[in-house]
Amino acid sequence: MSDNTINIDGQTVPFLPGQTIMEAAMAAEVYIPHLCHNPEFTPHGSCKLCTVSVNGRSAAACTMPAAAGQQILNNTEELNANRRALVQMLFVEGNHFCPFCEKSGNCQLQALGYYLGMMDPHYNHFYPARAVDGSHPDVLLDLNRCIMCELCVRASRDVDGKNVFGLTGRGIHTHITVNSPSGRLGDTNLAVSDKAAEVCPVGAIIKKRHGFAVPIGERLYDHKTIREVQTEAHK
Amino acid sequence: MPDNNTILLAVQTAAARHGNDPANLVQILREVQDALGHIPEEAVDDIARFLDIPRVRVAGVRGFYHFFHDRPHGRYEILFSDNIIEHLQGKPELLQQMCTRLWVEPERMSEDGLVRVGSTSCIGMSDQGPAALVNGVPVTRLNMERVETMVELVQKGVPLSQWPADFFQVEDNLRRADVLLGEPLERGAGVRAAVEKGSDGILAEIDRSGLRGRGGAGFKTAVKWDFCRKAVDTGEECSIVGPKVCDNTAATVRYVVCNADEGEPGTFKDRVLLNSHADLVFEGMTVAARVIGARQGFLYLRGEYRYLFDKLNGILAQRRRDGLLGENILGSGFSFDIVIHLGAGAYICGEESALIESLEGKRGTPRNRPPFPVTHGYLGKPTVVNNVETYALAAKIAAKGGEWFAAIGTAQSTGTKLLSISGDCERPGVYEYPFGVTVRQVLADCGAQDARAVQVGGPSGTIIGEGEFDRRLAFEDLATGGSFMVFNRERDIFEAARNFSSFFAHESCGFCTPCRVGSTLLKKGMDKIASGHGTCADVEELKRIGQLTRAMSHCGLGQTAANPVLQTLDKFWGDYEKRLISKEFEPSFDLDKALAVARRITGRDDAWAHVSAD
Amino acid sequence: MSEQKKIRVATCSLAGCFGCHMSFLDIDERLLQLLEHIEFDRTPLTDIKHCGPCDVGIIEGGVCNSENVHVLKEFRKNCKVLVAIGACAVNGGIPAVRNNIDLWECFQEVYHYGIGLKNGQIPNDPELPLPFDQVHPIYEVVKVDYFLPGCPPPADAIWKFLTDLLAGKTPKLEYETLHYD
Ligand SMILES: Cc1cc2nc3c(=O)[nH]c(=O)nc-3n(C[C@H](O)[C@H](O)[C@H](O)COP(=O)(O)O)c2cc1C
Ligand code: SF4
Ligand code: SF4
Ligand code: FES
C-alpha cells in the first residue's frame, strides 16, 4: 500500500491502480475544482479547471492517472487564480445572465465563480449569437449557457443509449447539436426522464416547468460552497 | 440543389467504396461532397443510415473540417493561402482585386452561386506564392495578371481542366541536397534490408543512427518503434511489458501511420518528398511495419495536397506490382499495405492523436494522454505515427545501416534536416543540411542579405532576431520541423505575430477552454493593437492570457499558440511600442463606430450622435 | 474617523433599473451611520447634475447609449475609486439580452409595431441619447477598480463592501453575500 500513494498539497493520498488523480482525491475527500468532470461518467478533460501541478508539470487531474510518488500542488493561489481566469473565460464566451437563469443557485459554473472569488468576468464579452431551442415539450436547450463539457453527450450516449447530443463546429464556434434532421430537440427521442436531461452542470439544458421551484436561500450553493457540496456528495 | 435520388446514389457509392465503415467517415464525406458540391442534410441522414451511426456524429464531423460545407459554396471556390509570407507578397491586394472584379465580398458566395473567394491557412506553397486553392487544386505564383485571367476563366465558366497548365505548376525548388535527397537509394533496397535483417536487426540500426522524429518534437524513433512492438493487446488494456511480439502473424494488431498533414505555416518539404521521393517514404513505412509487426499502414495526406492523391496511389499500385507492398512482400511471408486518407482542412489533425481520431472518421480532437498512440492508437491498437521525412530517412538507414548517419550532424541531432525556406530571400525552396548548421549560414545560402528575423519551426516554434543568427539548428538549440521564414529589415514583426495569432485562433479545435477562448482573446488583443487602440495595459493582459494558454491547454496547439505574441513582445518590443497609445485605458470597442447603426437608422449626424475618443 | 474630512461619494444609474440603488437604501438605519463618514455628490438622492471631484464613484447599470458614456467618463475623471455595482454594470445584465437583436428590429418593434402605436416614427431629436449596437459592462469602457455583483447585491453585501472600502481595506464579501443573481 505504501507505494500506492500520491501527495496532494502535503497530504498523503492513497490510490488504487487505474485511478486518476481526481478519483483518488475524491475518495480521500480532497477537493480539486472541476466542471466537466462528473464521477458517473468517463473522464473528459476539456474544461481544465482541475489543472494541478504534478511533479512540476501541469496536468488535468480528472484524466491524469495517479502514479506512485506524484507530488501534486492543488489548492495554491496561483492555480486558483488560473482557474478563476478559466471561469471568467467561460462566462465571456457565452451569454450568462444569471439573474434570469433558472439554474442560478444550482449552477456549477456560478458556484465555482463564488468559490474562486470571481467578482467580474474581467475579459471583454463575446456576446455570441446562440440558439435557444424550445421545441421539446419538456426540455429547454439554451446554448447561450453551454460550456461544451459534453456531459449531455456522454450521458445520452453512454447511459441513455440514444446519442441525442453531439458537438459540431470547431474552435470558438464549437457548439452542441442534436440528433434530428431538423436540428430541433423536439424532433429527437429525448425523454425528460433521460440522464441527459438532468446532467447539465449549467443552465443550458433545463426541464420545463421546474424553474425557480426552490426559493432563493435554499438552493444548492446558497449556503454551501461547491467544495462542501461536492465533497459531501462523494463521501 | 441535388435531388434526393442523386444524394442517395452519391452516398451509396461513397459508402460502398469504403466498406460502409464508420472509420472512413471523413473519406466518405469528402467523396459525397465531390459528387454533390456540398453535404446537405439529406446526405447526412443517408450516410448515418448506411454506416449505422447516429446522424449527430456525421453532422459533428462535417462541422469540424474547414473543407466540408453544409451548403453550396460556389461552383468555383478560390481560397487564398493566408501564410504571412504570401501576405507580405501581396495576398490581400490580390484577393481584394479578385473580389472587386468578380463583384463578390470576401468569404461570401456570389448570389448566382458561381464563385466564392476567401482565405485558408497556409497551403504549403510559400516558396512559390502567393498561391490559392481553386476547387482544391493549388494555383501558384499569383500576380495581378494571373488574377485577371482567373477572373475571366471563372466568368466564362471554363472548367479547371481547361485552365492554362502552368497555373498549376508546382515546383520542387530543391536548392540543396545532402545524403537524403542527393544520394538516390535503389528502389526496394530498404524493404529488402528489412526483410533480411528482421525486426531486431533493423531496430538496432535505427537505434544506432540516433534518428529522431522530424515532425518537430524530436522523439527517438527507435524508442517509439520499440515501445510499439512491445505493446501487447490484452483485449482491454494494452501495456508495454510482455514479451516481444513483432511478427505480424501474431495476435496483436498494430498500425503504421505517416503524418503528411504538414500544416505548420511555412513548411512544404513533405510536399517535395511526396512529389519526388514517395517511394522512399513508402519504403520507410514498410520498414517500420516490419519492425513493429504491422499489416496495415496509412498515409494521412492533408487536404491541401490532394492534387498528389492520384499520383501517390499510382506509386502504391506500382509497388504492389513489384512485390514491395501487399501480400508476401519479396516472398518473405511478410505482408503490409498502405491506404491514403485525405484530411479536409484542419491543422490540428497534424497532432498525432487528433490525426488518429480523424483516421477513425471522427472530429479531430486530440486525445487524453496517456495512453499514447504506441499502445492505444488507431482503433485502440498500438500505432506508430511518424513524419514523412522520418520515414524517408528510416528507409535509408535500413538499407545503409545506422553508423554513417550517426556520423552526420551533432551529438544529439544526428543526420540531416530538410528546411522549407521562404520569405525575403533570393532562392526560396527546400534545403537539406546536416543538423548543427547556423542560421547565418542558411541565410547566406538562400540569399537573404537583409534579414531582420527568422521564424524557425513555424508559428509554434521560435522567432529569432539578428543577435541570434549564430544559433544552430538542432534539437539541442533551435529545434525545428523545417519551417524557416525570413523577414527583412522592412518587415513589421508585429504583423507577423498578429497573423500567427489569427492562425491559432482559427485552427483551435475548440475542445479545451484555455485554447478555445485564450487563442481568441489573443487574436482580439492583437487586432486591438493593430487598430491603434492598444495600451500598455492591453499588452500586460496579452501576457497573462498567453501564460495561461501555454500552461493549461490540452495539446501542443494551445500550449504554443501564445508563442508568437510572447516571443515578439520580448524580442521585438519596438514594433509594438510604436503602435501603442499612451493612455492608461482604452475601451474594448470603438465607441463611435458602435453608434453608426443608430445614426443610420435615425438619420442623425449631430454632435450628440457621436462619441469622441476623449 | 468622524474627525476626518468626509468621504465624498457619487452614484448613478446608467442602463440599469435603480434596483441596486434601492438595495443600497435597504441598508436602512445603517445609512445614518454611513452618513457620519460620507457625503454625497451627484446621486439620484441629491440635486447635483454633474459629478465633481469625489473619493468614490458607484455605477449601476451597463453602457447602452452615448449619454451613458459621457456620464461614465465624467465619473471616471472625477472619482478616485470607481465601483461597478450590480449585474448590469458588471456584465451588461438584462439589457444586454438585446445584444443579438438587430438594432433596426428593436427600433421597429418600439416605434413602429409596438402595441398601441399608430403612425409611429423613429425619433431623430438631437437631445436623445443614441443607442449603441450592443450593451456593454462599464469595465469595457473605462477602468473600474472594484466590482460588487448581484442583481441587486443584497443590502448586507453593499454595507460590508462600503465599510471595507471606507476603512481603506480591499472589500471582501462573505460567501453568502457574493451572488451573480
Ligand atoms: C498542433 C500540432 C500539429 C502538428 N502537425 C504536425 C504535422 O503536420 N506533421 C508532423 O509530422 N507532425 C506534426 N505534429 C507532431 C505530431 O504530433 C507527432 O509528434 C509527429 O507526427 C511524430 O512524428 P516524428 O516523431 O516522426 O516527428 C503536430 C503536433 C501538434 C501539437
Ligand atoms: S448543454 Fe450542458 S451538459 Fe451539454 S455540453 Fe453544454 S453545458 Fe455541457
Ligand atoms: S489546446 Fe486547442 S487544439 Fe489542443 S485540445 Fe485544446 S482547444 Fe483543441
Ligand atoms: S474537470 Fe478536469 S478538465 Fe474539466
Image (spheres, coloured by chain):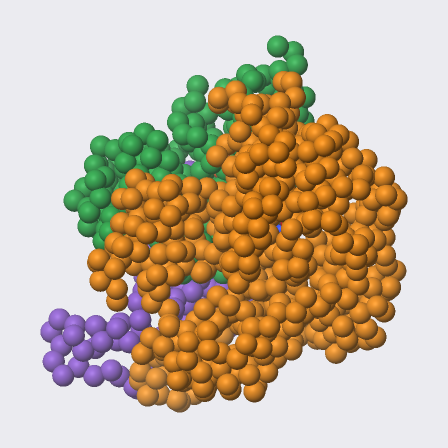
Chain colours: A green, B orange, C purple
Q: As drawn, is A24 to the left or to the right of B593?
A: right
Residue A175, visible in the rendered structure: no
Q: Position of residue B588 (x, y in %)?
A: 51, 67
Q: Is residue B102 above or below residue B218?
A: below
Instruction: Looking at the picture, tell me which residue is in the foreground, A185 or B45.
Output: B45
Quadrant of the image occupied by residue B333: top right
Instruction: Looking at the picture, tell me which residue is in the foreground, B288 or B108.
Output: B288
Q: Is residue B85 above or below residue B473?
A: below
Q: Position of residue C178 (x, y in %)?
A: 44, 43
Q: What residue is shown at x 46% (from left), y 42% (from top)?
A: B360
Q: What residue is shown at x 49% (from left), y 53% (from top)?
A: B342
Instruction: Looking at the picture, tell me which residue is in the foreground, A34 or C158.
Output: A34
* Count of numbered marks: 0
Q: Position of residue A41 (x, y in %)?
A: 40, 29
Q: As drawn, is B448 to the left or to the right of B107?
A: right
Q: What residue is shown at x 57% (from left), y 86% (from top)?
A: B144
Q: What residue is shown at x 75% (from left), y 50% (from top)?
A: B185
Image quadrant containing the N terminus of chain B: bottom left
Q: Is residue C43 above or below residue B15?
A: below
- The extreme top residue here reads A1
Quadrant of the image occupied by residue B33: bottom left
Quadrant of the image occupied by residue B440: bottom right
Q: As drawn, is B603 to the left or to the right of B416?
A: left
Q: Position of residue B424 (x, y in %)?
A: 74, 74
Residue A213, visible in the rendered structure: yes
Image quadrant containing the C terminus of chain B: bottom right
Instruction: Looking at the picture, tell me which residue is in the foreground, B19 or B91.
Output: B19
